[in-house]
Image (spheres, rainbow, N blue to C red):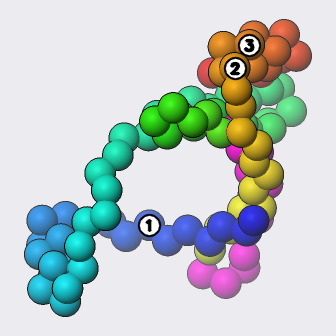
Amino acid sequence: MQEIEAKILDIDPIEIESKLRAIGAQRITKRMMKNTFFKNSEGIFLRLRQDGDRYILTRKIMAVSENAGIKSAQELETDISDPTALIHILESIGFSE
């Protein structure tokens, strides 16, 4: 999967939600995700995401475009059934939070 992300600063979330509702948008679900980031001495970053009962490990390979400083990332992801064991494995091979 390739991700292209845009960050929009200085927005009023209440105003945005109001405008979305005005054009018929509806909230499908509200959820909380927890992200834990790991890196090693080589600068490799991993993200362990908890989304409800699901855990996902992601390796992002970043690329910066010459066009207006746009960042994009190739993502490699896999589901994790035992996040505690994974954290011990990552720490044993040199990754830290």
On the image, which quarter does residue 57 sit in?
Answer: top right
Tell me the residue that label 1 is attached to: 7
SS label for mark 3: helix
Number of other residues with Cα within 10 Å of mark 1, as a class: few under 14, some 14 to 19, many 20 or more: few
Tell me the residue that label 3 is attached to: 85
| Nearest to N terminus: mark 1 or mark 2 | 1
| Nearest to N terminus: mark 3 or mark 1 | 1
Left or right of residue 72, residue 44 in this image:
right
Residue 67 lies in the magenta stretch: yes
Q: Where is residue 35 shown, x and y percent of the image?
A: 52, 35
* 3D distance between C-alphas at marks 1 and 2: 32 Å
On the image, which quarter does residue 32 sit in?
Answer: top left
- Identify the mark at residue 82; answer none if there is no mark: 2
Tell me the residue at 60%/81% (across/down). 68
Tell me the residue at 24%/79% (across/down). 25
* 3D distance between C-alphas at marks 3 and 2: 6 Å
Number of other residues with Cα within 10 Å of mark 3, as a class: few under 14, some 14 to 19, many 20 or more: few
Decide: is 36 above or below 71: above
Q: Where is residue 7 shown, x and y percent of the image?
A: 44, 67
Which dot, 3 or 1, sits closer to the camera? 3
Left or right of residue 40, residue 72 in this image:
left
Q: Which residues are drawn in magenta?
A: 57-69
Tell me the residue at 49%/39% (across/down). 51
Q: Amino acid at mark 2?
A: Asp
On the image, which quarter does residue 55 sit in?
Answer: top right
Q: Amino acid at mark 1?
A: Lys
* 3D distance between C-alphas at marks 3 and 1: 34 Å
